[in-house]
Amino acid sequence: MSTYNIPHDQAAELAAIGAAVQGKYNDLAAFGINSNHFHHLKCRMMWEEMVAMDREGVPIGVETLCHRFVGADKINSPTIVDVNHAVDACPTTISWLYWAEMVESKRKARVIQEAGLKLAMTSGECDNLDDLVATAETVIYSLNQSITTATGDRKESFQRVIGMLEE
């Protein structure tokens, strides 16, 4: 049995969260960052909480995110300490774009790895070469779609920001 290393960078994920709580959430959302960009469970949960706060109209900041995690289960949920680690990972928000590009590259690498593993599994089970080629074309097409999805999300985010500015 083979083992695979899943592409991820916890420091980059924490830094992206840190930048978001220090005022760059809208920039990161406009860049196309979503929960799929976070491999680590606590980072994903912190991002999803910020998305919920944004939907509710709650200002996103260090204090407001920490308040959401007061009394949280310390094993399975983010805590105030995790939020503070995220802030420490990104001491200045000037680097938000670097961290956004880093988590985006790791997300793309995970998607490519998943597609490659799917093709490898399919090739081992397929008896007909034509079916294998058709499946490979489908997987590669869906891979192209999933890698470029962030661009579509980015356009929607920019439209949301423009709508907020117009209001």
Image: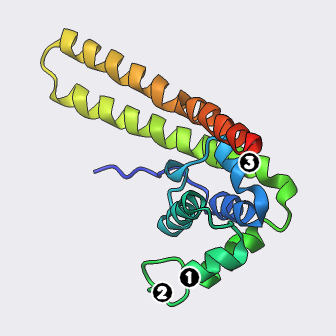
| Badge 3 density bin: few <14, some 14–19, many ≥20, Cα 10 Å | some
How far apart are the alpha carbons under marks 1 and 3?
Answer: 24 Å
Kindly identify which numbered label has been placed on residue 79: 1
**Which residue does the image show at 40% across and 21% down from the upper left?**
140
- Name the element at disc 1: loop
Q: Earlier in the sequence, mark 1 or mark 3?
A: 3
- Name the element at disc 2: loop
**Which residue does the image show at 63% across and 80% down from the upper left?**
66
- Amino acid type at circle 2 is Lys
Left or right of 145: which side holds 19? right
Residue 55 sits above or below residue 160 on the image: below
Relative image position of residue 92 (x, y in whole percent):
86, 63
Disc 2 versus disc 3: nearer the observer: 3
How far apart are the alpha carbons under marks 1 and 2?
Answer: 6 Å
111 or 52: nearer the eye?
A: 52
Relative image position of residue 16 (x, y in whole percent):
69, 58
Q: Which residue is mark 2?
A: 74
- Mark 1 and 2 residues: CB-CB less than 8 Å, in contact? yes
